[in-house]
Every structure is written in structure tokens, then in C-alpha cells.
Image: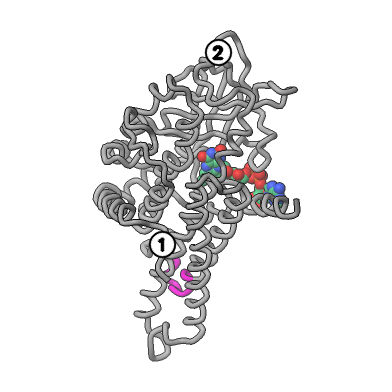
Amino acid sequence: MRRTLYTEEHEAFRKAFRAFIDHAAVPHVEAWEEAGTVDREFIRAAGEGGFLGFEFAPEFGGLGISDFRYNAVMTEEVVASGMVGDLFSMQNDIIVPYLRDLATPEQQQRWLPGFTRGECVTALGLTEPGAGSDLAAIKSTGRREGDHLVLNGQKTFITSGATCDLAIVLVRTGERDGRGTTFVAVENGTPGFERGRPMHKIGRKAQDTAELFFTDCRVPVTNIIGEPGRGFGCAIANLPRERLSIAVAAIASARQALELGLDHVRQRDAFGGPLAQLQSVRMQIAEMHTDIAVLGEYVDRCVLALNDGELTAAEAAGAKYKATELQWEVLDRVLQLFGGYGYIEEYPIARMWRDARIQRIYGGSNEVMKDLVGRAVVG
Ligand SMILES: Cc1cc2nc3c(=O)[nH]c(=O)nc-3n(C[C@H](O)[C@H](O)[C@H](O)COP(=O)(O)OP(=O)(O)OC[C@H]3O[C@@H](n4cnc5c(N)ncnc54)[C@H](O)[C@@H]3O)c2cc1C
């Protein structure tokens, strides 16, 4: 069946974006993995190319286009190119709604032009050492003192935490019987804001992940994002989009892995012929192919539902957990089909496998996703 999600415009955009990353990113992947982060020049070039913040209004350097199919195209091409990195998904899929929908016009004036130029790398700080799945348990505080919030606390596992120019963090501000939480944007260089060194991860090595520390960090109240005391609600509203982004990446990765696996089993001989001639191998290929096709359709439908403002939290959670479980299953099976070569770093499947492990954990662990779906279904 023909995939119907994209139009000619999306495909033209795909070509342009792929040409950009093939030229500006792919040759540097090894170096960025060693450095633990992508190059700033690349981020600026992505801005110049119009690949950052295109949903923002033209006055801020965007194109005013809100169509998640473009985000999905970018995710698919990042995966297919082997680039690996969360720059585009972090900036475009996760942060954009906070700055587009919740930031004041003055804040937009301050931060969006830098964002679209690739000069303002952003991070989102929700998780704390004692509060990941249970976000309501966050302990970082923002105490109001005149025109400032005084931040104290710690965030952990923050994507782009070590290199970001602007961190949007969730802190407890105490409104609503002490339960209130608020998002506040903290600029790099603000006294009392420190970042830890990049954490050593088992995969996604070109993407820095770090702790953030706040010690009597004074941030003007004009940096509050969204309504004070309603931070938790803002996070809940934006999480379906983040989870869909993860699901899109998962399906793209499973497709890419299956392609690699197919090339391999057609070429690799054992017992007098290519592996592909073994019935058990063909059955595995059939299962993976069909599972990807079926689930891929569901994820495509979720993309359209998001565009129409109809994607529910449970639908996004279902897409996230199911797609990342399938991704893991496919990558593991394809790696097995590669035999010993699958365990060797030079083979893309090895890298894809280790880079994929986090997909079932971040954005809300898959167990938490199932709980969310279950509660929605049971009622
Ligand atoms: C590479 C990386 C990047 C990340 N980027 C960011 C980021 O940019 N910003 C950010 O805020 N966070 C980020 N995170 C944090 C991530 O979202 C959390 O790690 C994740 O939500 C799980 O929280 P936790 O690690 O505290 O695990 P815990 O909450 O301690 O959960 C551990 C495990 O317990 C089980 N579990 C927990 N609750 C339930 C439940 N209700 N039902 C059943 N089982 C349950 C699950 O198996 C879960 O995996 C990142 C993490 C990593 C590793």
C-alpha cells in the first residue's frame, strides 16, 4: 500500500533537508560522538537553512507553518542518515509549543530570533534525581522575591543541558495549596545556574545530557513561561507531541533497520545460499515488515490527529510505547541476523541498537505509558 501521509511539498522538503544533513552533519558524526555534542556551526547552518523553529511567525525568522508532517520528515531523515542527535526533535518538536503558545510577545521577541538562527539552543528540565515518572514529586523551588523568582534545586538527565543557552525548567512555586508548579526560562550565565559535565551514556553519544543546578538563582518574573502555578498542566498538554515525536523516530528506525537486515540476508551466504533463502529468516522478515506497516499507519494517523488538534494523551502514549517496543524488537532481531558483525561498531545496526535503548525510557517510561492508556480505557 502507498503511504499517503505526505504531499509533494513534504517530499520536496525531505530532499532539501536530507541534502543539508548529508553535507553538513553526516561527515562529522564520528567527531561529534567523540566530542559528546554536535558542532555549533552546524546548528547555525541549520538555522540558516530554515530548519529550526519554522512554526514561529516570519517576524521571528520562522515560516509560520504548523504541520507536524514536516517535523516527521525531519525525524525520518535524521534516522535514515545515521546522524543521531536530538537537536531537531528537542528544538522543533518539544520546545516550540512552549515558546509559540505560552511565551509572552516580549519573551518571543527576546528568544525566537536566536532560536530560528540556531544561536539559542534550548533544553527542557522536568526530571529531578528524586522525580522522573512521578513528576508531581519535584522538589526544585522558585520562591517569589519582588520581581524575581529565586530558584533552588537540581534537574537531571537534561538533553542539551551542558550546552543550552536557555533552559525551561519546572519548579515548585507553591500556589494552589502548595501544589503549584511553574515553568521558568533560565538564561545561560545567570548567577546561581550551574551545569554538570555531560553524562556518559551507553548510546546517543553525540547528544549531551547533563544535570542542572540552581543555588539562589535569581530569575526575573518576566521569564515565567505560561501561567504561574499551572506548570504541571502545561507539561501535560505538551507531552503528547513529545511522545509522538518519539514514536515517529521509532518507526523510522525500525524501517531503516529492516532495510539493513534485508540487504544483509540477501548477500550473506550460509549452508550453500543466501540467508534470505532460509524459511525461518523469511518468516522473521515477514513479521517485521507487517508489524512496521501496520503500526506505521497508526503513527501516521496520530500525526494527522495532532495537526487537527485531536490527538489524545492516551493515543500518543499508546503510539509511544508500542512503536518503541517494536523498534527494540526489530533492531534486536536484525542485529541477530547480522551475527557477529551486528556486534561490531562499524556496522550501523550496532550503533542503532545501543542508541535506541533509551526510547523505551524517556518521554515517560513505557510502563507509565501503559498505565496512562489503561486508565483512559478503563475510565
Ligand atoms: C538520555 C536521556 C535524555 C533525557 N532527556 C530529558 C530531558 O531533556 N528533560 C527531562 O526532563 N528529562 C529527560 N530525561 C529523563 C527521562 O524522561 C526519565 O529518565 C524518565 O521519565 C524516567 O524517569 P526516572 O529515570 O526517574 O525513572 P523512575 O521514575 O525511577 O522509574 C524507573 C522505572 O520504574 C518503572 N515505573 C515507574 N513508574 C511506574 C508506574 N507508574 N507503573 C509501572 N512502572 C513504573 C518503569 O519501568 C521505569 O522505567 C532523559 C533521560 C535520559 C536517560
Q: Is residue 258 above or below residue 372?
A: below
Q: Determine which residue is flagged by label 2.
A: 148
Asked if residue 26 shows in the view, the reply is no
Residue at 48% in and 49% down: 245
**x and y percentages locating residue 132 in the rendered image:** 63, 40
76 and 208: which is toward the camera: 76
Q: Give the quadrant of ligand 1.
A: top right
- The answer as to whether callout 1 falls within 8 Å of ligand 1 is no
Q: Determine which residue is flagged by label 1.
A: 4
Residue 256 located within the stretch drawn in magenta: no
- Indicate which label's residue lies in the foreground, 1 or 2: 1
Q: Amino acid at mark 2?
A: His
Q: What residue span does the magenta drawing correspond to?
A: 334-345
Residue 266 vs residue 294: left or right? left
Residue at 35% in and 56% down: 7
Q: Amino acid at mark 1?
A: Thr
The answer to whether marks 1 and 2 mark residues whose Cβ atoms lie closer than 8 Å is no
How far apart, in angstroms, are the residues tagged by discs 1 and 2? 50 Å
Mark 1 or mark 2: whose residue is earlier in sequence? 1
Could you say which quadrant of the image residue 154 lies in?
A: top right
Residue 344 located within the stretch drawn in magenta: yes
